Image (spheres, rainbow, N blue to C red):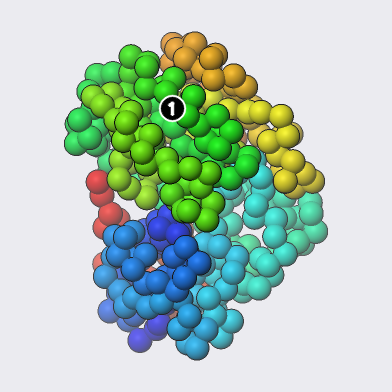
């Protein structure tokens, strides 16, 4: 039996692994062990909070004493350096180019998301062209955006929203460069006044007292109503699939949104990318895939305009999507094919098909 380990330090990290976990459960040769770290503490309870699939769950501190056959990780800190094989699966690609991190060399293999990532690694001297460590996979987390497993009407109705109305999703980043910290209350109140559905999915750290500038839960509860909902979930994918327009900033959801090929609005402000100077990329795709807004007062008008012309930037979005992602809609298949190849094992028939639907 092969032991497969994964560490989550935030619930959303687990969402990166969930599609692989669901399929590995079908293989009796695999034993899954999940390690949790929550708000800086070793805490397997985070995995319950995330609704993790069946597995042996352990606090993070135990991981360093183990020697799993494979360690999957969605962030750069390694739970254990004793794994026989380690695989970086990433937690998203964004304008920040966070993946340009020297710690990528700690991993034996990289499940690259697309040509763009590989090209940037080569441009910055991280890898040579054709390096076998870079495997062409994509982002399994986003398969459900296009594989037909989600139902827009059912999702909206389950949250008390009218499916006949346009739906806007607000999904910001976190920290000093986020629109939430910079203009969050005014933005949320402006959205709540619009005659359409609003879904709000904040970053996990927006609810972490170590990082949050305020308790956003109180404001979201105040604004919640027949057309405004903040679903109690760490999984943004159903919200994205059900929405007609995205409002974000420098979050990786902006690039994930490319897979649904719909309008988006980037909230901007001066020095927003100061912390990422020299690493952020606004030249290749950046904000070309959407419309920029630096004033909350203009946001309702921009949203109305973009909803009226949803195909306006379609050519650019589709070109960007093809560059940023391999295997759109079937990245989980690609990941498992690479995984079983690395393990020198035959891919089981039972693992074909997703076990996660909403």
Name the residue nearer the viewer: 220 or 164. Answer: 220
Q: What is the x, y in percent for residue 182?
A: 59, 33
**Residue 273 in view, yes or no:** yes
Residue identifier under label 1:
188
> What residue is shown at x 52% (from left), y 56% (from top)?
210
Name the residue nearer the viewer: 66 or 25. Answer: 66
Rendered-image quadrant of the N terminus: bottom left
On the picture, is 272 further left or further right than 306? right
> What residue is shown at x 30% (from left), y 45% (from top)?
232
On the picture, is 138 further left or further right than 352? right
Image height of 167 relative to 5, above or below: above
Image height of 57 relative to 178, above or below: below
**Residue 340 in view, yes or no:** no
* Element assignment for label 1: helix
Query: What number of labels is visible?
Result: 1
Quarter occupied by residue 313: top right
Q: What is the x, y in percent for residue 166?
A: 33, 20
Q: What is the x, y in percent for residue 347?
A: 37, 71
């Amino acid at each position: 039996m092969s032991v497969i380990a994964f560490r989550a330090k935030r619930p959303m990290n687990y969402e990166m692994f969930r599609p692989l976990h669901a399929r590995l459960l079908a293989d009796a040769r695999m034993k899954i062990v999940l390690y949790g770290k929550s708000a800086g503490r070793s805490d397997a309870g985070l995995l319950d909070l995330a609704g993790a699939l069946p597995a042996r769950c352990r606090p993070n501190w135990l991981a360093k004493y183990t020697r799993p056959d494979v360690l999957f990780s969605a962030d750069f800190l390694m739970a254990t350096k004793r794994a026989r094989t380690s695989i970086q699966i990433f937690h998203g690609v964004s304008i920040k180019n966070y993946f340009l991190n020297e710690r990528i060399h700690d991993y034996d293999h990289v499940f690259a998301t697309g040509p763009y990532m590989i090209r940037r690694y080569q441009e910055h001297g991280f890898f040579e062209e054709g390096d076998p460590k870079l495997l062409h996979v994509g982002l399994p987390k986003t398969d459900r955006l296009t594989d037909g497993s989600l139902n827009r009407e059912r999702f909206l109705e389950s949250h008390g929203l009218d499916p006949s109305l346009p739906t806007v999703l607000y999904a910001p980043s976190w920290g000093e460069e986020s629109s939430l910290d910079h203009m969050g209350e005014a933005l949320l109140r402006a959205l709540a006044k619009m005659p359409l559905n609003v879904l709000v999915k904040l970053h996990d750290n927006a609810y972490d007292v170590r990082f949050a500038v305020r308790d956003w839960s109180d404001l979201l509860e105040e604004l919640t109503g027949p057309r405004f909902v903040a679903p109690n979930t760490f999984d943004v994918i159903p919200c994205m699939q059900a929405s007609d327009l995205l409002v974000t900033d420098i979050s990786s959801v902006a690039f994930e949104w490319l897979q649904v090929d719909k309008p988006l609005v980037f909230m901007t402000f001066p020095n927003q990318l100061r912390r990422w100077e020299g690493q952020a990329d606004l030249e290749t795709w950046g904000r070309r895939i959407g419309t920029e807004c630096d004033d909350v007062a203009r946001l309702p008008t921009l949203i109305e305009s973009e909803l009226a012309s949803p195909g306006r930037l379609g050519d650019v979005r589709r070109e960007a999507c093809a560059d940023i992602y391999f295997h759109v809609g079937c990245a989980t298949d690609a990941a498992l094919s690479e995984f079983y190849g690395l393990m020198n094992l035959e891919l089981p028939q039972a693992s074909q098909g997703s076990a996660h639907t909403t």
